[in-house]
Each structure stands twice: as structure tokens, then as C-alpha cells.
Image (spheres, rainbow, N blue to C red):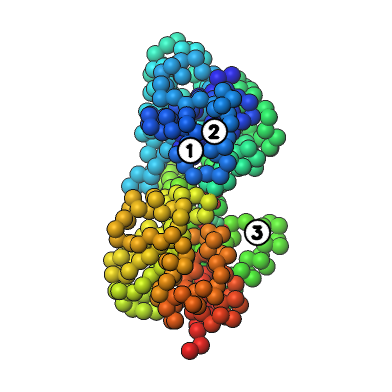
Amino acid sequence: MKIVIAGTGYVGLVTGACLSEVGHNVTCIDVDYEKIEKLKLGISPIYEPNLEELIVKNYKEGKLNFSTDYETEYKDCDIVFIGVGTPERSDGSANLDYIFKVLNQIARSVEKDCLVVMKSTVPVGTNDRAELYLKEHLKNNVKVEVASNPEFLAQGTAVLDTLNASRIVIGVESEEAKNKLLEVYERFKQPLVITNRRSAEMIKYASNDFLALKISFINEIANLCEKVGANIEDVTKGMSYDTRIGNKFLNAGIGYGGSCFPKDTKALHWLSNDNEYELKTIKATIEVNENQKYKLFRKAKELYGELKGKNVAILGLTFKPGTDDLREAPSIPNVRRLLEEGAIIKAYDSVGEENFKKIYKEEITYCNSIENAIHKAELVFIFTEWKEVKEFELDKYKVMCNEDVVILDGRNCYRIDDMKNRNLNYYSIGREFIKRNK
Ligand code: UDX
């Protein structure tokens, strides 16, 4: 079975590497020549644990290949997985331009029957449209069918999430398509959900949006905890023993970022409006998250009024640990506001720094250690719970920062008692605000 993957972003590349790892012959296609050449040298364009190792190993073994020549690759393939981006349009809807560009290339190139599998997150009904489009644009007299097979990988654990997926969702309209996909996933032992295309598409949105809703819900409870003197961590612990609730995705913080939740909540909201229905819970999820992003900034303003000339340290820039991705990272709009206020910013995030420099280069000072970033700081903002930040020796805040420093922790990295014992000003999410005794 010859498998071709369109797109070497997170979804495409991880899918390609993992399918070759379980024994398939896979070729990953991308229009970006440089990216493909680097991949052939074993260099991954994204920071993702275990990915580069899989790429190198399977490329050497001849099971994984990379090419820009889509015409040759599509010509005689059995399955094409589409893993290109579906970015957000200004109205919140999903932009399907890349998808249709790939479909056009497939339609013009295929010379034998093949199955096109949609891995990208697409609005309900897109797979039907895709099949129609292919049929209308086919150059040769072959049979092409479309199936939906959404992925559920999270950045930072993408390889693990793919090889040990919680479930494999297959959305098909024929036995033939179903059997082909069952053959692809033969070696995977996870539960299979076999359904029609529209339900598979909806499973992906509903799953992501439910997780986003869980985060916004707990963030609202955390905000209320601060007002009524409750502690969000004890609250979530108390909730989580109820197995109907569980203990996952209940970490309060400064909101969700990344390439999926912000985009997929807006896309589903748009889709519901387009179908003359309002998803009230998703609308609220989006609003709560938008507001939550600026929680630390608002606190800093409340405490100081003026932030002009204040020495600010920023720890963590990426939207979560384990990735260099900055998409929808709360750090970005907060840095913008801090700069507008005239704050002097020093930042530390060894993984996210390079990408952040593409947004702000000269405006902030990048440091090579937490110590350097917090030196003489009057405010410390924690935007990402990197292990290094969580394990940082707390006494150093005392020694290195300005005496009156306020640590604003957007990811609840430290224990309240530890901060109390060190007599530090410490504000976190949904917990008691610790104020230093002078
Ligand atoms: C997510 C989904 O987890 C994955 O299944 C889907 O395929 C793509 O979207 P990802 O965006 O990589 O994956 O990261 P995830 O770990 O889910 O975190 C998303 C955001 O939510 C991060 O900003 C994270 O900080 C935030 N989050 C997560 C919380 O604020 N609290 C939590 O309890 C969990």
C-alpha cells in the first residue's frame, strides 16, 4: 500500500512518521523545497519530542520519504492523507484554501483508484464537498473516494498521542473505504469508532471544544474562588474524585492558546450560526478565554497603575511547555500591552525565543537564564509552566529581584505555602494573593 501525506506541518509530519514506524511506505509532500531538503537530512521543521528520531530512522530504512513532486507521488498512490492547515478567517470560519489546492492537485494527478483521507480539522460537510470537487475535476477515469479520519494529537506529545491514540475515528461512506483504513490501522490496538463522514468531522470539533469549555469553566470558577476566598486547586481536587468529572483539563490559568482550541471554538461557533443555531456554551467559552488572557496584566495595572519604566521579567513565551509554538500564546498580546505601557521587558524561554523574535526583536531583551531575566525585576510574569520555571529555586526570587517584586503566575507553578514562607508578593490564579510583610 502506497501512502502519500499532503503537508508536513504538525499533523502531516507526525502522521507520516508514525505510519512509517508501524511499517507502511509513506511519502510526505510539501510545496516548500527547503523544508523537504532539511527533512531528508533528518532535520525536523518543528520542535516535537521523538519526532526527529522517527524521521531519521524510517528515512534510513527507506519507509519514509519526502518530496515536492506531488504529480509523481499522487499518480500511483493508494491513499492520500491531507494534513494541511485550516487557519481561521477574520469571521471565525475555517479557511479551506489549502485543502482545495491539494484536492485540485490530486484530481489532476491520480492515475489509479485512490482513497483521500482528511486528517485536517474541517467543518462538517467538507468531506462531502471534497469528494464532489474531486469527481468534478478528475483528469483520468479513476475512482476516488473521501474519508474522514481526524487526529487528536497534542503538541509536545504528538508522537505518543498518535502511536497510542485514545481512539481512532473513521468516517466513511462505503465498505471499501472502511476496509482500506482498517488496513492502515491494522497494527494499532486502540478502540475504533466507525461512523459516517459528517459525524467524524463533528467528533473532532466537539472533542476540542469540550476540552476548551472545560478550561473556560474552571477558569471562571477560579476567578470566583479569588473573590470568595476559596482555593481552586482544592476545589478541582475535590471535584475530580467524581469519575464523571475526572481530573484532566481542570488546570486554571491564563486561558488556552495553541493552534487548535482558539480556532476550533470559533469555527464551530461560526458553523452553528451559519446553520441558524447558537452554541451558547461555545460562545461563552470564547469570551471567557479572551478575558482570561489579560488577567495578569490587569492585576499589574491594578497594583501599580503606571507600568512605564517598570522592570518586567517574563518567564515562558510559548502557549504551553514542550513546544516552540507561539500560536495564540497569551504572552503575545500581554507583551504588546506591556510595551504600549512603556515597561522594560526581559524574557526567558530558550525554546520559544527564536519564534518570538520574529514578532518582537529589538523591543525586548532576551536572556539566557531565569536568573538573568529576573535580575532587578519589579514584576515577574509567568506565562508558561516550563519544568525549569516550576523547579526554580524560590529563594533566588528573593535575592535577585527588586525587594518589592510581585510574581504574577499565570500557570500556578508554585505552592502557596512556599511563597508565604519566603515572604514574597505572589499572585496566582484562583488562589489567595500573598502579600509580603514589610
Ligand atoms: C489540543 C488537544 O489537546 C488535542 O487533542 C487536539 O488535537 C489539538 O488541540 P494542543 O493545542 O497541542 O492540543 O495542547 P493542549 O495540551 O490541549 O493545551 C491547549 C491549551 O490549553 C494550552 O494553552 C494549555 O495551557 C491550556 N490548558 C490545558 C489549560 O489552560 N488548562 C488545562 O487544564 C489544560
Question: How dense is the environment of label 1, judged by Cα within 10 Å: few (below 14), some, or many (20 and up)?
Answer: many
Q: Amino acid at mark 2?
A: Ile
Q: Amino acid at mark 3?
A: Asn
Callout 2–callout 1 Cβ contact below 8 Å: yes
Tell me which residue sits at (51%, 25%) in the image: 65
Residue at the disc numbered 1: 44
Tell whether 290 sits left or right of 191.
Answer: left
Residue at the disc numbered 2: 55
Task: Report the label total.
Answer: 3
In the rendered view, tell whether residue 411 sits above or below residue 143: below
Q: In terms of secondary structure, where does tag 1 sit?
A: loop
Callout 3–callout 2 Cβ contact below 8 Å: no
Residue 12 location (% of width, % of height): 49, 34
Tell me which residue sits at (38%, 70%) in the image: 312
Residue at the disc numbered 3: 247
Upstream in sequence: badge 3 or badge 2: 2
Upstream in sequence: badge 1 or badge 3: 1
Tell me which residue sits at (36%, 34%) in the image: 97
